């Protein structure tokens, strides 16, 4: 049985996908693909907040 530690992500995944290397490979490729996606979502959200803040400031000035 794998250690029940939610932070041990790759251990959990390795335990779940044990004996299925092709699925494991797909899973880790997908997981690697998700990291830049989340990064771009966070950056996009910050950009949105900054532009909304600027719009609010412009409305106050007018």
Image: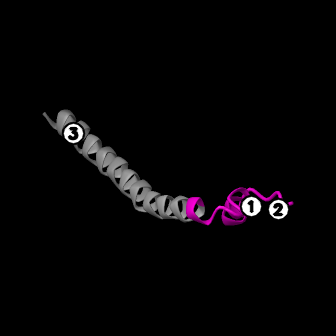
Q: CA distance from mark 3 to mark 2?
A: 51 Å
Q: Of 46 and 35, which appears nearest the observer?
A: 35
Give the mark, 3 or 2, whose residue is nearer the N terminus. Answer: 2
Look at 54% across and 65% down and name the residue there.
25
Residue farthest along the left direction in this orientation: 62
Judge left or right: residue 9 versus residue 40: right
Give the mark, 3 or 1, whose residue is nearer the N terminus. Answer: 1
Mark nearer the viewer, 3 or 2: 2
Would you call the spot at circle 3 few (<14 residues within 10 Å), some (14-19), or many (20 or more)?
few
Q: Quadrant of the C terminus?
A: top left
| Label 3 with label 1: CB-CB less than 8 Å | no
Q: Secondary structure at mark 1?
A: helix
- Residue assigned mark 1: 15
Q: CA distance from mark 2 to mark 1?
A: 6 Å
Q: Is residue 15 magenta?
A: yes
In the rendered image, residue 58, in percent from the top left (x then y), is placed at: 17, 39
Magenta stretch bounds: 1-23
Rendered position, 56 above or below 35:
above
Q: Quadrant of residue 36?
A: bottom left
Q: Quadrant of the N terminus?
A: bottom right
Look at 44% across and 54% down and name the residue there.
38
Q: Secondary structure at mark 2?
A: loop
Please tell me the numbered disc located at residue 2: 2
Q: Is residue 21 magenta?
A: yes
């Amino acid at each position: 049985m794998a250690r029940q530690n939610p932070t041990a992500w790759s251990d959990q995944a390795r335990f779940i996908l044990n004996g299925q290397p092709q699925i494991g490979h797909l899973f880790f490729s997908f997981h690697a693909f998700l990291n830049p996606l989340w990064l771009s979502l966070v950056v996009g959200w910050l950009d949105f907040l900054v532009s909304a803040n600027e719009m609010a400031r412009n409305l106050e000035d007018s």
